[in-house]
Image (cartoon, rainbow, N blue to C red):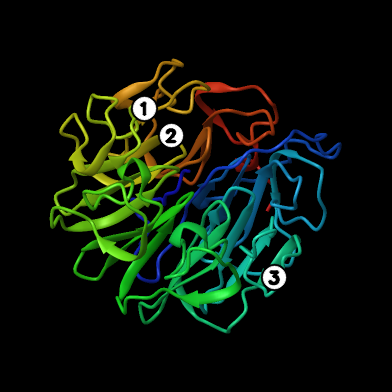
């Protein structure tokens, strides 16, 4: 899937920072909301964006979350389902948030106090409210935990508390949460192993986290080498990523993983059939390999079968599957090494989704590119684009 997190120039992201991610699943199209329009004067400044499966969400500087795209299970958080929106609409409830993360068909945010709220698809308990009932508005995650960050995946969600304890909830198959391959949980369960995490990121069937010294650990499904431990074996507990690299961030995709190390290089591992590992091959890798090109990155976000990195200059480079233009380089050609996103924009954050990508530029304006059948690009249309298009919600009445 596509998860990843976002990064930022000019936006502090750390233990109490913004978290984002995105993951994959499939869905069917539904009618567009007849009230959709490109709203009026005034401009919102966005500080974070999260690309999911068929929807996207973004956070404004004053703590309001807007979502757009598919809404068949309430993932836009507007209080109802089955009406897509091709421009951003505010999430219901009037809450103030400091982060946003988008899963396949759900999303989660944190309040300034660290309380987690989620909404959308909940058939496996990924909302964390003790039920398996879809939620059309944000509801609090059970347990009263205070999180430093949270990450939404396809059928589950994980977070790291202020003290660094990792919890997950939802579909726990393939070792997705702790040491149980067969059951799920509708409320947060502590991840086994006793590690203290700075962040935990969620993919399709695996997740990874970094500890305070920058050591990366992964667990869950091990096929295609996505855990990076040198094997293809499922792991029920966090297992150290091979190589002793010092990671500042790890982004988890559908079946691959990428991370930024302390000198700004990006390493990736896992499924590589579309070049999503970025090493100029299509050979799967079960240990981290450096992404080609010698670029220096501030962050990386792993989508379902592609990845994008924010270079320290503010340029975004993407690689991997490009059938719908999700790499944003003006083509629909897969890339086995980083290719620059067209337009020469200076980005502050980027998030790779299932088949689309979104980014925030340094003035707080949003752009998206790739697949758009559900309106997930937010430009008021359902037309795919292989170059960045302006998100209509960047022009919203305050």
Q: Secondary structure at mark 1?
A: loop
- Please give the name of the residue rendered at 37% of the width and 37% of the height, measured from the top-left corner: 308
Which marked residue is nearer to the observer: mark 1 or mark 3?
A: 1
Residue 240 coordinates in the image, percent (x, y): 23, 61
Q: Which mark is residue 305?
A: 2
Q: CA distance from mark 1 to mark 2?
A: 9 Å
Image position, residue 329 (x, y; %): 40, 21
Which mark is on residue 156?
A: none
292 left or right of 14 in image: left
For the question of whether residue 123 can be seen, the reply is: yes
* Residue 339 sits above or below residue 214 on the image: above
Q: Residues within 10 Å of mark 2 (few under 14, many from 20)?
A: many
Asked if labels 2 and 1 touch by Cβ distance under 8 angstroms, the answer is yes
Q: Give the crowd class for mark 1: few <14, some 14-19, many >=20 residues within 10 Å.
A: some
Compute the Cα span from label 1 to label 3: 38 Å
Mark 3 neighbour class, 10 Å CA radius: few under 14, some 14 to 19, many 20 or more: some
Q: Which residue is denoted by mark 3 in the rendering?
A: 139
Badge 2 element:
loop
Q: Position of residue 141 (x, y in %)?
A: 62, 74
Query: Which residue is at the front of the view, 145 or 277?
Result: 277
Viewer can see residue 311:
no
Q: Position of residue 208 (x, y in %)?
A: 35, 58
Q: Which mark is residue 273?
A: 1
**Location of residue 238 with respect to 44 vertically, above or below:** below
Label 2 to label 3, Cα distance in Å? 31 Å
**Label 1 or label 2, whichever comes before in sequence order:** 1
Q: Is residue 157 above or below residue 204?
A: below
Give the left or right position of residue 364, taking residue 36 as reference. Answer: left
Q: Residue at x 52, y 33 (%)?
A: 356
Q: Quadrant of residue 195?
A: bottom left
For image coordinates 82% across by 39% down, the residue present is: 33
Left or right? Give the position of 63 relative to 137.
Answer: left
């Amino acid at each position: 899937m596509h998860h990843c997190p976002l990064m930022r120039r000019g936006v502090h992201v750390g233990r109490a920072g913004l978290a984002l991610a995105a993951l994959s699943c499939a869905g069917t199209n539904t009618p567009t909301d007849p009230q959709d329009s490109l709203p009026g004067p005034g401009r919102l400044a966005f500080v974070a964006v999260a690309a999911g499966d068929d929807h996207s969400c973004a956070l404004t500087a004053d703590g309001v979350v807007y979502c757009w795209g598919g809404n068949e299970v309430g993932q836009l958080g507007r209080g109802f389902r089955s009406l897509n929106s091709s421009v951003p609409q505010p999430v219901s409830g009037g809450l103030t948030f400091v982060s946003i993360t988008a899963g396949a068909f759900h999303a989660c945010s944190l309040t300034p106090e660290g309380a987690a709220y989620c909404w959308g698809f909940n058939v496996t308990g990924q909302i964390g409210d003790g039920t398996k009932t879809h939620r059309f508005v944000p509801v609090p995650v059970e347990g009263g935990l205070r999180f430093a960050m949270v990450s939404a995946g396809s059928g589950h969600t994980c977070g790291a508390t202020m003290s660094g304890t990792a919890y997950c909830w939802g579909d726990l198959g393939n070792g997705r949460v702790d040491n149980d391959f067969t059951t799920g949980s509708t409320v947060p369960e502590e991840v086994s192993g006793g590690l203290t995490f700075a962040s935990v990121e969620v993919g399709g069937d695996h997740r990874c986290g970094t500890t305070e010294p920058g050591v990366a650990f992964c667990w869950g499904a091990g096929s295609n080498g996505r855990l990076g431990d040198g094997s293809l074996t499922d792991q029920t507990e966090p297992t150290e990523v091979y190589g002793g690299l010092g990671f500042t961030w790890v982004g988890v995709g559908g079946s691959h993983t990428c991370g930024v190390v302390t000198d700004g290089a990006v390493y990736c591992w896992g499924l590589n059939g579309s070049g999503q590992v970025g090493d100029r091959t299509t050979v799967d890798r079960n240990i981290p390999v450096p992404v080609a090109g010698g670029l220096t990155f501030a962050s990386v976000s792993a989508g379902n079968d592609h990845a994008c990195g924010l270079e320290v200059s503010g340029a975004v480079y993407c690689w991997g599957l490009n059938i719908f233009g999700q790499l944003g380089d003006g083509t629909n050609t897969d890339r086995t090494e980083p290719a620059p996103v067209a337009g020469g924009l200076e980005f502050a954050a980027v998030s790779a989704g299932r088949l689309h990508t979104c980014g925030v530029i340094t003035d707080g304006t949003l752009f998206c590119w790739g697949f758009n059948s559900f309106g997930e690009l937010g430009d008021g249309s359902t037309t795919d684009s292989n170059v960045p298009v302006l998100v209509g919600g960047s022009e919203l009445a305050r």
